[in-house]
Image: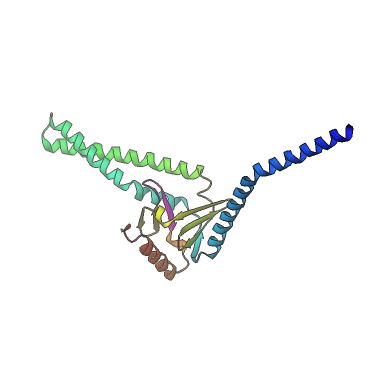
Amino acid sequence: MRNTKRLVERIDCVVTLLFMLLINLPTQKQKKTNNQEKLHKEVIKIMEKEVMKFGGRLTYKEFKTFNRFHLKRIVQISFITLWITVFLINLTNKSWIPSLTISLIIAILTILLIKILLNARVRKEFRSDQVLKKDAQFVVYDSGITILRENSKTHYDWTAISSFQQYKALFLLYVSKNKAIVIPRRYFSSVQEIQLFKQLIAKNLSQKTNNQ
């Protein structure tokens, strides 16, 4: 009787084990598929051609310059709007020459105050952002650009870059309306590297390039 009971228990264990294996089989297959996909992506990444590499550390002066370029249009529009508004308000009580003079003085003083506040905000942002102050390595591929920093890695496909602007000391790759990848010209070791980078930009962002 005991032997029969043990046999039944063993058979029950075997059946349970087989049932569990059958249930987990699709999951294991899915895991295998996921691993194959990851491996495929890694292979593609390894085979992807590295076009150029450059890097450095962004300074506060360069970060301030970027913000000045970025906010330049906003400041100009604010100045014109404020000047016209104050002029029209004063025009109701004074002739146009005093109104023009007073409104101009008020607009200039207001814009100077705004610039002082913006500079303070930029300084505070740079001091508090530890990532900005770290060395950055830029690796340019056929598919996009990768930014390597200590304990971080960010990749942008060319399709993710909305526009490009170049200035005397900076290249700006905008990934959104208010966010840009800031690349100082000094990161490049030669004029040839700068020309190659500009060619890559022209090739991949031919419809978005905005030279200034």
Vertical placement of residue 57 versus 198, above or below:
above
Q: Is residue 108 left or right of residue 151?
A: left
Vertical placement of residue 126 versus 146, above or below:
above
Q: Quadrant of the N terminus?
A: top right
Residue at 38% x, 45% y: name it.
178
Vertical placement of residue 18 versus 52, above or below:
above
Residue 115: quadrant of the picture: top left
Magenta residue span: 175-183
- Residue 145: give x, y in percent of width and height: 46, 58
Residue at 62% x, 50% y: name it.
29
- Residue 26: give x, y in percent of width and height: 61, 46
Q: Is residue 117 left or right of residue 94?
A: right
Viewer-proximal residue, 172 or 12?
12
Viewer-proximal residue, 61 or 22?
22
Residue at 69% x, 40% y: name it.
19
User: Which residue of the protein is positioned furthest toward the bottom in this rendering?
Assistant: 192
Viewer-proximal residue, 153 or 3?
3
Q: Number of numbered discs present?
A: 0
User: Which residue of the protein is positioned furthest toward the right in this rendering?
Assistant: 2
Q: Quadrant of the C terminus?
A: bottom left
Model colouring: rainbow
Viewer-proximal residue, 204 or 187?
204
- Asked if the magenta segment contains residue 172, the reply would be no
- Asked if the magenta segment contains residue 182, the reply would be yes
- Residue 133: give x, y in percent of width and height: 52, 50
